[in-house]
Amino acid sequence: MSTAYEEHDPRDPRTRFPAAVGALLREAGWEPGRWDIEQAEYWADTLRAHTSPGGHEHAVFPAAVEAWAEFGGLRLAPVAAGRDLAPLTLDLDPLAGLHMARTLADLGRALGTELSPLGREADSEALLAVDAAGAVYAIDHTGDWYVGPDADRALTVLLTGGRPVRLTVG
């Protein structure tokens, strides 16, 4: 099965994303080489300092900090119709998951990894999370979803209305 993403070379900043996704990212303030490590460290410190009333703490690891440094703070609002689903507006603010430490820990444990918040789908309120290997997941009221093996592919799926893979059956 061929996807629009496969037509692009992730090593080449000019063709790293499909044209429509690249345009949305640039409109939101992203550019190749974007790296706001100070902001990413602020988010890391804030998440590390938060403990839920039940004693749950956030996992913070390099893959999360890297995703935050490159994409954190962006608000991405697709305007085109999606391939399989309607694409949703994304707010890539990890603090959207500040009070979801237990949920992330539970899913991470089920997956055999750690999860850290990445942001949210603004329209559905689904929480976006990244694992220690850089894969991206969505967690909403209907279940848990695998979105992509890395932030680039996950953003492409979400912004083009691709179909994530359901992890749980409710």
Image (cartoon, rainbow, N blue to C red):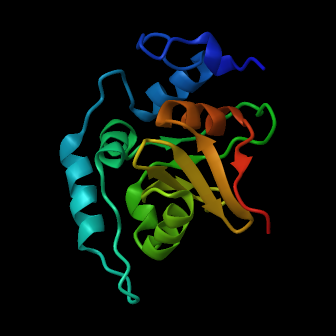
Residue closest to the eye, 109 or 9: 109
Residue 76 appears left or right of 114 = right
Residue closest to the eye, 145 or 46: 145
Q: Is residue 78 visible?
A: no
**Location of residue 110 in the rendering, given as x and y in whole percent from the top left corner:** 56, 64
Question: Residue at 41% of width from left, 14% of height from top?
Answer: 13
Question: Residue at 63% of width from left, 16% of height from top?
Answer: 6
Asked if residue 165 is positioned above or below residue 170 in the image, the reply reads above
Residue closest to the eye, 111 or 24: 111
Report which quarter residue 36 is drawn in: top left
Quadrant (top left/top right/bottom left/bottom right) for the C terminus: bottom right
Asked if residue 126 is positioned above or below residue 9 in the image, the reply reads below
**Location of residue 39 in the rendering, given as x and y in whole percent from the top left corner:** 24, 49
Asked if residue 82 is positioned above or below residue 115 in the image, the reply reads above
Report which quarter residue 24 is drawn in: top right
Q: Farthest residue toward the bottom?
A: 53
Circle count:
0
**Location of residue 112 in the rendering, given as x and y in whole percent from the top left corner:** 50, 58
Asked if residue 15 is positioned above or below residue 46 in the image, the reply reads above
Quadrant (top left/top right/bottom left/bottom right) for the N terminus: top right
Q: Farthest residue toward the left?
A: 38
Question: Residue at 45% of width from left, 56% of height from top?
Answer: 113
Question: Residue at 60% of width from left, 54% of height from top?
Answer: 138
Q: Is residue 170 visible?
A: yes
Residue 159 appears left or right of 168 = left
**Location of residue 73 in the rendering, given as x and y in whole percent from the top left corner:** 38, 47
